[in-house]
Amino acid sequence: MIPSTLAAPAPGWTADTDVVVIGSGIAGLVAALRCRPHGRVLLVTKALLDAGSTRWAQGGIAAALAPDDSPADHLADTLTAGVGICAEDAVRVLVTEGPGAVRDLIGLGAAFDRSDAGGIALTREGGHHRPRIAHAGGDATGAEISRALLAELKDSGVEVIEHALVLDLLKDAAGRAAGITLHVMGEGQPGGVGAVRARAVVLATGGLGQVYSATTNPEVSTGDGVALALRAGAAVADLEFVQFHPTVLWLGDGARGQQPLISEAVRGEGAHLVDAAGVRFMLGRHELAELAPRDVVAKAITNRMRETGASHMLLDGRHLGAATWERRFPTILAACRHHGIDPVTEPIPVVPAAHYASGGVRTDLYGRTSVPGLYACGEVACTGVHGANRLASNSLLEGLVFAGRIAAALADDLADVPGPSETVEGRGRLLDPARRADVQRIMTAGAGVLRDAEGLDAAARELSALAAGEPAGAPGVEAWEVTNLHTVASAIVAAARRREETRGSHWRLDFPERSDGEWRGHLVTRLEGDALTTTYEPLEGDRA
């Protein structure tokens, strides 16, 4: 059980546009810029324009840019990391259109690091058999991409509302997306709860990492887009595949909230994972050792911690030398030193933490969801590219490529759509903001890195009990956020209980093996009334 279908109070103000884009990471910024030919574009973002997950991306963006690389090689690595359930047609779009999309990004002014020969410097990360990760500022790729896109946005004519939490989708009488309701918190803008009426709505709201106690995601990543889509009747898929980044700076027992990420690129440059005794425990576990796909490394770290009783493992990059740390990883170096660790002279204590949702709002190859007029791109979407486990540095590329595809689709999709029309709304209840820590505790304990039926069943019971508890006293932003977290948490648990196998980033201790015969497919979740329904859909080629 989750709280009933939600909607905002009667809007106190309204605004009209043609396309409203929600989110200001790479996916939202590219979508907003590319949608300009289709009329007025309004970009809504939850905090400041540069406060999303993109600016925190360290490693880089993956694309077959090297002469000895190819989209076919990138395709193969992505399919391998996705453990059998990637949508191959979506991956083929990603890797084929990716190099051109990155070059377009460079054309907008994004400055990637250069090799001594003058070309784009490329490195390797986990799961990649060739160097194909373009990076900027050493380990500040996301910040550079965000800077370039925001500079392009400045004089683009795209309207912007900052400090605005999206609440729910507006629909017309025919069930088509017709805008959004939102709560604006900033000064000097339309205040309070209002409505934006639009001919198309693009979700680019990012991730849901704040559903767990420890995450690499910023505070704004509360699953707002997935929760909105569920309440609007859209299908979501693959939510059980929450990727835990293997190497996050361990800040001590009891640390909560956003944790500093130690990029996979550090291992790509030669750092080794070791236990307290100095043993490289990844050797012999995978042909790529420390550069194995993220699910393999995170599981190995977690198991080694259980075997040794240690609270963390160590990432040893002392042999890289001060010059490499200062040139390639200045941001990571500063973050570690801020917390009293100097990677130049000592190993870094690391643990896995919630990092990326491979699943999300289900879309086709042009970002269309199951609700007409509603589109999704970036981490909030499930294009099928990532399967059961995202390949490192494919996330920025996915946002870049599929945001552009949404803009292309709108050229035809909006041809017969009139201007903003009358809308209909639902109403419901919100959870008490004080329950946020309870949701995070429940999810970390029962649906974290390692799962089993007992823990998942307990999580489902506790989440249901929270939904039946006292509602929020007032419909404020904090109440909406915890309700969104609860909605998403309930959907993750429902899918994780259903999938009785271990695949990619979904690890069942009670079902430790992969089962292609029964589970080579997708779990699709919908919200019907106040109940979630999860159905299994085999891959197209496996259907009888």
Image (cartoon, helix red, strand yellow):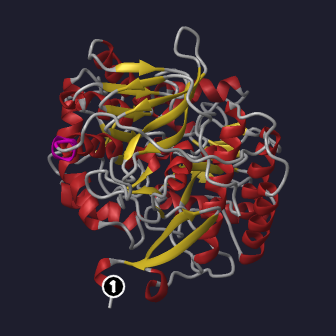
Residue at 32% across, 40% down: 200
Question: Looking at the image, which is closer to me, 193 or 249?
Answer: 193
Residue 328 on image: x %, y %: 44, 29
Residue positioned 57% across, 40% down in the render: 262
> Position of 309 compared to 321: left or right?
right
Identity of the residue furthest to the bottom in this view: 544
Q: Residue furthest right?
A: 470
Q: Is residue 411 magenta?
A: yes
* Residue 273 appears anywhere in the view: yes
Is 389 located above or below residue 544 in the figure? above
- Tally of marks: 1
Q: Dot 1 lies on which element?
A: helix
Above or below 224: residue 220: above
Q: Position of residue 476 (x, y in %)?
A: 70, 31
Query: Pointer 1: what residue?
Result: 542
Locate the N terminus and report the quarter of the image it occupies.
bottom right
Q: Main secondary structure of the magenta part?
A: helix
Amino acid type indicated by mark 1: Asp
Q: Which residues are magenta?
A: 410-415
Q: Is residue 440 magenta?
A: no
Choose between 544 and 181: the one closer to the eye: 181
